[in-house]
Image (cartoon, helix red, strand yellow):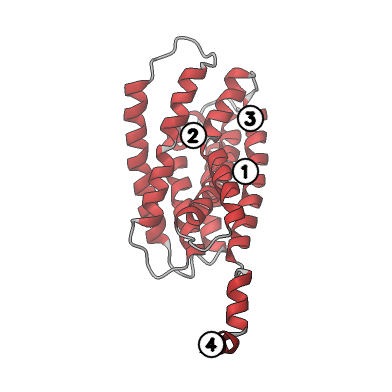
Amino acid sequence: MTVFHFFNCAILTFGPHAVYYSATPLSEYDTLGTSIKAAVVYLATALVKLICLATFLKVSESDSFDPYQEFLKALIGFIDVAGLYFALTQLTHRNISQNHKFQAVGLGWAFADSVLHRLAPLWVGARGLEFTWDYILQGLEANANLVLSISLAALGSLMWLRKNKPKTLIPIIYLSAGIVATMPSITSYLRRGLGWHFPKVVGFELFTSLVMAFISWQLFAACQRPSVGSVAVHAHPRRTNSSNE
């Protein structure tokens, strides 16, 4: 029974990553190498974050919410944004579109996060003699993190790779990316500051991930549409040329 519970929790935690890869065009374009490179960048980023946390944060004796400490954690958390920037812009990718690139990077990023933060607790705890819902909730939390990681990668691709995006959408893109990047601090405040229990926090993460995924999808679709000026130029090339003559 304990082994069965472990495999159920493991499938819930890591299965959606494999399903997403096989059910989307990522598998057709063979973007596995891009996801692996993104996972390696995540591990390097996590190491830098760990060093910064150990250097600048003090060990708290209580589990209460400390605004100054959480502010420092939020600042250090933006190292993830720098890591995503490197993964999206500096790594060499195959000839894949921007749409597939950010999905592959976000998928590898989320999978590395789940392995680093959830595999060991799952292996130790889910095989225990006593059944608990905590590891099922951790699996659901990993699913929310998958959606948030792909959303942040999509927003990052709009910020750094998309040059001709509408100017009116730029503040919304940066605001949405900031919200996703600070989600760990937001959930920490809900747990420690407001005293939310773990199931309620996971429910909030799932809801927020769906909302941010919808916003990111709408922003990406809006930036994919050709602008009015470019449509007019392509629609009347002869008129433009004749006016120049």
In-front residue for pair 176/50: 176
| Label 4: element kind | helix
Q: CA distance from mark 3 to mark 2?
A: 19 Å
Q: Is residue 59 above or below residue 87?
A: above
- The residue carrying mark 4 is 241
| Label 3: element kind | helix
Instruction: Tell me whether circle 3 and circle 2 mark residues in contact (CB < 8 Å).
Output: no
Upstream in sequence: badge 3 or badge 1: 3
The amino acid beneath tag 2 is Leu
The amino acid beneath tag 4 is Asn
Upstream in sequence: badge 1 or badge 2: 2
Upstream in sequence: badge 4 or badge 2: 2
Q: For residue 160, what is the image quadrant?
A: bottom left
- The residue carrying mark 3 is 201
Seen at 49% across and 10% down, the residue is 62
The amino acid beneath tag 3 is Val
**For discs 4 and 2, the disc positioned in front in the rendered view:** 4
Q: CA distance from mark 1 to mark 4?
A: 49 Å
Upstream in sequence: badge 3 or badge 4: 3
In-front residue for pair 197/22: 197
Give the class, few, some or many, for how many residues have Cα within 10 Å of label 1's Cα (few <14, many ≥20).
many
Q: Is residue 209 above or below residue 73?
A: below
- The residue carrying mark 2 is 122
Upstream in sequence: badge 1 or badge 4: 1
- The residue carrying mark 1 is 209
**Residue 50 location in percent, x, y?**
35, 30
Q: CA distance from mark 3 to mark 4?
A: 60 Å
Q: Is residue 143 among what the camera can see?
A: no
In-front residue for pair 41/28: 41
